[in-house]
Amino acid sequence: MSVPGTDIGDNSTQPGPAADKGNELKSFSSDALDFVQRRQAVIRFVEDAIAASVDRQKLNADNVGRGNIHEFKKGSLV
């Protein structure tokens, strides 16, 4: 008695979802790589924008003043 799908005598490749797996994997790998590269570019852009903003704030604080004009003496409780 033969059970469908368990014949081991036929080693030929059958068309189907698994037959084209190599091309799908390459396509997936390429898409994943594109996604990662875009994501890294966005992260670099945001990090650069934050760094520029911090630099502007520091420059402005240095030019205008930091708001703390109190001078402390040795032994004063702060």
Image: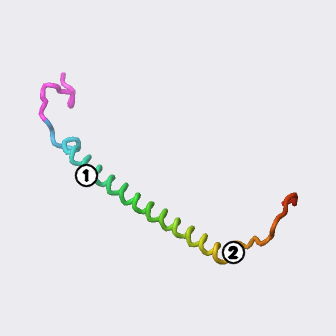
What amino acid is labelled 2 in the image? Gly
Q: Quadrant of the C terminus?
A: bottom right
- Relative to 71, residue 27 above or below: above
Please provide the residue range marked out in magenta: 1-12
- Distance from disc 1 to disc 2, alpha carbons, whole Å, reads 56 Å
Q: How many marks?
A: 2
Residue 5 among those drawn in magenta: yes
Q: Secondary structure at mark 1?
A: helix
What amino acid is labelled 1 in the image? Ser
Residue 63 tag number: none
Residue 7, image x and y in percent?
Answer: 17, 27
Are there few (<14), some (14-19), or many (20+) residues within 10 Å of tag 1? few
Q: Secondary structure at mark 2?
A: loop
Proximity of marks 1 and 2: CB atoms separated by less than 8 Å: no
Determine whether, in the image, residue 46 is placed left or right of residue 28.
right
Q: Nearer the viewer, residue 33 or 10?
A: 33
| Residue at image location 33% in from the left, 52% down from the top | 32
Q: Quadrant of the N terminus?
A: top left
Residue 42, image x and y in percent?
Answer: 42, 63
Residue topped by disc 1: 27
Furthest-front residue in view? 74
Are there few (<14), some (14-19), or many (20+) residues within 10 Å of tag 2? few
| Residue at image location 22% in from the left, 44% down from the top | 22
Residue topped by disc 2: 65
Kindly indicate the quadrant of the structure image that contains residue 6.
Answer: top left
By secondary structure, the bulk of the magenta-drawn segment is best described as loop
Kindly indicate the quadrant of the structure image that contains residue 54.
Answer: bottom right
Determine whether, in the image, residue 13 is placed left or right of residue 48.
left
Q: Nearer the viewer, residue 40 or 71?
A: 71
